[in-house]
Image: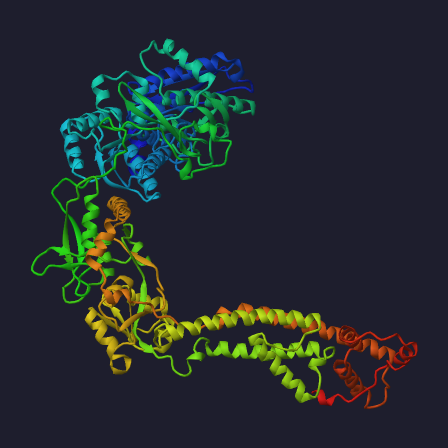
Amino acid sequence: MSAVCVWPLLLLLFFGVLSNGVISENVNSSRPAIVNIGAVFTFDSTIGKSSYFAIRQAVDDVNSNFSVLHGTKLHVEMRNSNCSGFHGIIGAVQFMEASTVAVIGPQSSEVANAMSIVANELQVPLLSFGATDPTLSSLQFPFLVRTTQSDLYQMTAVANIVEHYNWKQVIAIYIDDDYGRNGVAALNDALAARRRKISYKAGIPPGPGVSRGDVMDILVKLAVMDSRIIVLHVYPALGFTVLSVAQHLGMMTDGYVWIATDWLSSVLDSSQLSSEKMDSMQGVLVLRQHTPDSDRKRTFISRWNNLTERSVGLNSYALHAYDSVWLVAHAINSFLNQGGIISFSTNSKLSSGGGNLHLEALSTFDGGKHLLRNILQSDLNGLTGRIKFNTDGSLFHTAYDVINVIGTGFRQIGYWSNYSGLSTLPPETFYSNPVNFSNGTQKLHSVVWPGNTVTKPRGWVFPNYGKLLRIGVPDRVGYREFVSKSRGTNTFKGFCIDVFTAAVDLLPYAVPYEFISYGDGKENPSYTGLVNEVASGFFDGAVGDIAIVTNRTKIVDYTQPFAASGLVVVAPFKKLNTGAWAFLRPFSPLLWGVTAAFFLVVGVVVWTLEHRINDEFRGTPKTQLITILWFSLSTLFFSHRENTVSSLGRLVLIIWLFVVLIINSSYTASLTSILTVQQLYSPIDGIETLKKLEEPIGYQVGSFAYHYLVEEIGIRESLLKPLGTPEQYAAQLELGPKNGGVAAVVDERPYVDLFLSTRCKFRVIGQEFTKAGWGFAFPRDSPLAVDLSTAILTLSESGDLQRIYDKWLSRSTCSLETAEIDSDRLHLQSFWGLFLICGIACFIALLIYFLQIMRKFHHSTTADPVSDGQGSSHSKRIQKLLSIIDKKDPIKRQSKRRKTETPVPEDNNASSELQSNSEPEIQRVDHIF
């Protein structure tokens, strides 16, 4: 920054010829006849040639349109910057002598950086139609207005294309100045946001000193790298040299992808290239600043050939230059309409200090801030579409055309915009819809790639410098069927090795690799350590029985799992004899207790609901107790003799009989299994039982089981015992925890299946308590992981994966008899829903019953109030309530009699007598309770 700040002081040494005094313009309140603006750009550049005609034509069009400035004429003074910041500052300072209110340009980012310092100090708006450096911020340079699109968006478009074709890495070739470096930095950020990256940056020094040999040295270095996606962000002359050398080196052939930024589209639009140059860029993808189609644009294009006499073509930068003039004209008109006066005053900060620089000749535009505000608040339509600025000073809508160089021309394959991403429709068709960047909407037309192929390039190859991929393989001690190292050699064999080699053989390209042993061969190595070596770059990949677990997926990429896995518990077992008490084993003790309790509860509930109205539930207390027990137990066999009369009693009984039916059927099925099928027993039910028992547990050395048991299950480290081989498994399990062994072993299912195939004294207890798989590990974003995943799926679908499995892991007869031990008992969890329904039914029935009783009690106390004698009223009320509960309902009695007896003639006298004796008497009911 300090070097840039001294630019004005250095160049002002050349301005001793500047006149003394303050430049000012005495104007009255009327509009000035002429308003001066400047333009600074490189006349002989591709952009400068077309911009010269565009600016001149824009000034003519503004002056010929009275409605723009209402009689005031716009005068433009153009100066050539020669792509030099020094010349740019000279031009800017010279404009200040001519009372210039705004400057159009420059086209170069470096020149814009230098000129912005002068513009800020003298408060003259600088409208750049070609400076795309994304670091040119309105915060640092408030008087710099970028009327073109920033490379921040162009590099986002490049990153979107890379993501669209699922490429992971790119190589960036750039011009090593502010324009190139900052553009590539923006590309790196955009790629990183999409989990892509620039694998190599090749900077080329600016200036004429770069020879074809220098470019060839750079490209030769790139040719042996693995990435085949090359982004070219340079100036036109250097860009054509790079493409020509690339063609000479065979880097424009099948497999390569070249993406050029808008420097190439500007040339393609501006001039007719030779066949030699066109041949060197076949299949290249190019970005071009998008300008929407309109009648005004078509009219201007038709005028362009007459204007330029076909000497230069029209590119997007020329259109932005044309619109910049109109933007300034409208802003000046608003400035004058708002009462603004064009005047300049001496800048007190500038002083020659007694020397000959005459800095006081430089003046500040008094209305600069006002004019700048009008420019930034503009909202008008130009040749490039809608001209409106965001709060950060960037254009409101930015978009690019994506074109493909084919033959002697190019074909447009789609668009990119900061509103809708990639699409095959013009961006303006999406502006009325919500923002949508979903993958389903991102599309482009087909592309003809370098090498004249339409097949999407893979985007990478293995480096062509004789280096083999270092594939780490665990040197196992136990379970060598999965992977093992041949002693005395560096060769490996096993199930995992065969799967890897079969998958590699299916790839459409050769993979040069070598297996590197990992471990000391004395005990199983740490698989987490092996994965860490892949993540650190020591290994290019890892092949073996590597479990896919969460912590590892954070640092490496796995292939598609080629084997299912999960932790299980293995423990010894014993065979159970049926025995005299085998009939109790179908139910757990808790289920027996709850079932017995519900038998009694249902009996009491039915008795409560029936004893007032049903003679079969009445009698002496002893008789009623026997009735309750007999009725409840007889429902087990559906042999109860007592009939229920009440609706509530029948409801409870129907629900209870359904519960009994389910329990009875389940008991019968479970007891049948116990008596007819060989039963295996283990005191361990699963991982939770192990945790409660706090007995030693074995695990395989190097497995992730250790960390899982400690961190996830919460088992103390002191209880875990490392084991390395199947023989150690068997020995420790046979010893048992009381003799220095282990109660159980926790390991992955494939190992356990192989272990049990020859050892029939042990069984799997419970179910798998984790779900995982085995895969091959590679560094993050490795394209080989993706291709191998596809190959593994192909092996699975063709049956080859199963054949490899059978070759190494075929099971013996013992393994076919292997069965997981699980509890044969039925538990309360299986029936709690039935008991809940029955309990709710009983509760509701009792609630309704007691509400009915309380209603009768209320009517009885109203008809025959109890005396309020001291000490007796409370007990009498309780006795009366109990008598109502115990008294038999006469209406129900008559109803039952009519069903069971012969009808008798109606006796009016008897009826009257019954009527007169219908009042209840208070009786002793203590015997009920």
Q: Is residue 798 visible?
A: yes
Q: Which residue is drawn at 43% across and 74% down?
A: 671
Q: Going by the image, does 8 lie left or right of 31?
A: left
Q: Going by the image, does 495 lie left or right of 876?
A: left
In the current view of this chain or complex, which residue is farthest to the front?
902
In the current view of this chain or complex, which residue is farthest to the left?
488
Q: Can residue 776 be seen in this view?
A: no
Q: Going by the image, does 373 lie left or right of 505?
A: right
Q: In the picture shown, does residue 560 fall above or below 170?
A: below
Residue 269: x and y in percent read: 33, 19
What sort of colour scheme is used for the picture?
rainbow
Q: Which residue is drawn at 44% across and 21% down?
A: 293
Displayed quadrant of residue 274: top left
Q: In the picture shown, does residue 756 fall above or below 123?
A: below
Residue 515: x and y in percent read: 14, 53
Front residue of 103 and 398: 398
Quadrant of the drawing holding the N terminus: top left
Displayed quadrant of residue 650: bottom right
Q: In the picture shown, does residue 750 fall above or below 110?
A: below
Front residue of 110 and 707: 707
Quadrant of the drawing holding the C terminus: bottom right
Residue 793: x and y in percent read: 28, 47
Displayed quadrant of residue 826: bottom left
Front residue of 669 and 833: 669
For the image shown, how many numbered marks are present on the structure?
0
